[in-house]
Image (tube, rainbow, N blue to C red):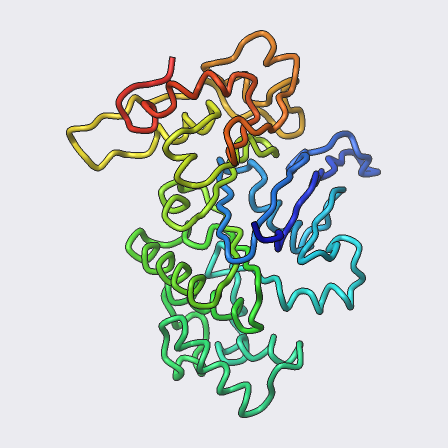
């Protein structure tokens, strides 16, 4: 097993709730509350969950676009959270991000050539003719024409803009890319093109991805392993094939039951979760999923289950994960619902 390129341990990000004329802190929004995982070189780790569960905040804390409250983020053996501004800028060359919104993430006042050339100048990689040649190479790499370097963002479609965003992330030849829901704002037909592009680039350039998304079908297609988040915590982590074939957390089982089955001869029993997602400002005691869980018992409201290895390489934060070992394959195949 290769040493992790990215190692996250007990990552926490709490946003203060301020009220009154003096803006006193009256509470905390626990956006990320003790997240741990590792990503090996060349691996694609999918990070999935409902909107508001802390996926994007986790990705941005790793890059220090948002400063974490506590925890540890190690990249290639270096502690990211203790770096000064100069060292962090140098490290940013190896860690890049593709943003969710291709419309707001590009500067409307700059041409595409200027946007792609800017990181090359900042990191001292190329100037003048060498920079223009690199920009043309990047545009070709993502399926655009070198002539597009003279155009502005408003002259492109959403899919083309996202290709420019990918090219910008690749400009400095990073080793890790945080893809923050890169296809959620695009049409379905365009989504497939961007996903295929990302997968092709990952294989050709041996990139490592942290792929943030809420679409389980997309994550299954591109990811080697998948981490499922709920209300600021990782509740399940496994190889992609294992998680989709045998989910070992009731939240994951519920998410998978919502995926449409293309075969009309097969029917998947739909599990409808009761209630709404609790507020991250006041999460429930015990297991955070227990107010909506179809397997909840008395212990779930008292004791928070640790993320433990139920099967080799398959981790679950559920007191009764072992009970799903026999029923999960049936639920995943779409033939019946778990008891």
Q: Residue at x 73, y 55 (%)?
A: 80
Q: Residue 229: x and y, percent?
A: 54, 35
Is 242 on the left-hand or right-hand side of 296? left
Determine the residue positioned at 54% across, 31% down.
Answer: 315
Q: To which quarter of the image does residue 192 belong?
A: bottom left
Residue 289, quarter of the rendered image: top right
Q: Residue furthest left?
A: 265
The quadrant of the rendering that contains the C terminus is top left
Q: Where residue 294 sits: x, y (%)?
A: 45, 15
- The residue nearer to you, when weighing 129 against 5, is 5
Residue lying at the far top of the rendered structure = 298
Horizontally, is 253 left or right of 29 in the view? left
Front position in the image: 238 or 86: 238
Residue at image x 40%, y 42%? 215
Give the x, y percent position of residue 188: 31, 51
Left or right for 26, reference 107: right
Q: Is residue 195 above or below residue 294?
A: below
Residue 319 image offset from top left, x and y in percent: 56, 17
Task: Identify the residue at the far front of this view.
Answer: 1
Q: Name, please, the residue furthest toward the right.
A: 22
Q: Is residue 121 above or below residue 251?
A: below
């Amino acid at each position: 097993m290769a040493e992790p390129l990215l190692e996250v341990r007990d990552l926490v990000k709490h946003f203060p709730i301020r009220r009154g004329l003096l803006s006193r802190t009256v509470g905390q929004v626990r956006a990320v509350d003790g997240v741990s995982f590792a990503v090996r070189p060349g691996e694609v780790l999918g990070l999935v969950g409902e909107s508001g569960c802390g996926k994007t905040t986790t990705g941005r804390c790793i890059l220090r676009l948002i400063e974490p409250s506590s925890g540890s983020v190690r990249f290639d053996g270096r502690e990211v959270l203790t770096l000064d501004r100069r060292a962090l800028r140098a490290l940013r060359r190896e860690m890049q991000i593709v943003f969710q919104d291709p419309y707001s993430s590009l500067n409307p006042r700059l041409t595409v050539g200027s946007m792609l050339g800017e990181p090359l100048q900042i990191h001292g990689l190329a100037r003048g003719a060498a920079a223009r040649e690199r920009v043309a190479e990047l545009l070709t790499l993502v399926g655009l024409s070198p002539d597009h370097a003279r155009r502005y963002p408003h002259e492109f479609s959403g899919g083309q803009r996202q290709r420019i965003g990918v090219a910008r992330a690749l400009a400095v030849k990073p080793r890790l890319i945080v893809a923050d829901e890169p296809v959620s704002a695009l049409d379905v037909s365009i989504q497939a093109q961007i996903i295929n592009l990302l997968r092709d680039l990952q294989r050709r350039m041996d990139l490592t991805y942290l792929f943030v998304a809420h679409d389980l079908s997309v994550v299954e297609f591109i990811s080697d392993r998948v981490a499922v988040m709920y209300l600021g915590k990782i509740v399940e982590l496994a190889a992609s094939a294992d998680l989709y074939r045998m989910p070992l957390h009731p939240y994951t089982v519920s998410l998978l039951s919502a995926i449409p089955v293309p075969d009309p001869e097969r029917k998947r029993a739909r599990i409808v979760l009761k209630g709404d997602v609790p507020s991250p400002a006041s999460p429930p005691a015990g297991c955070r999923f227990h107010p909506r869980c179809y397997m909840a018992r008395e212990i779930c409201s008292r004791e928070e289950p640790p993320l433990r290895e139920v099967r080799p390489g398959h981790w679950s934060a559920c007191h009764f994960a072992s009970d799903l070992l026999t029923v999960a394959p049936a639920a995943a195949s779409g033939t019946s619902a778990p008891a």
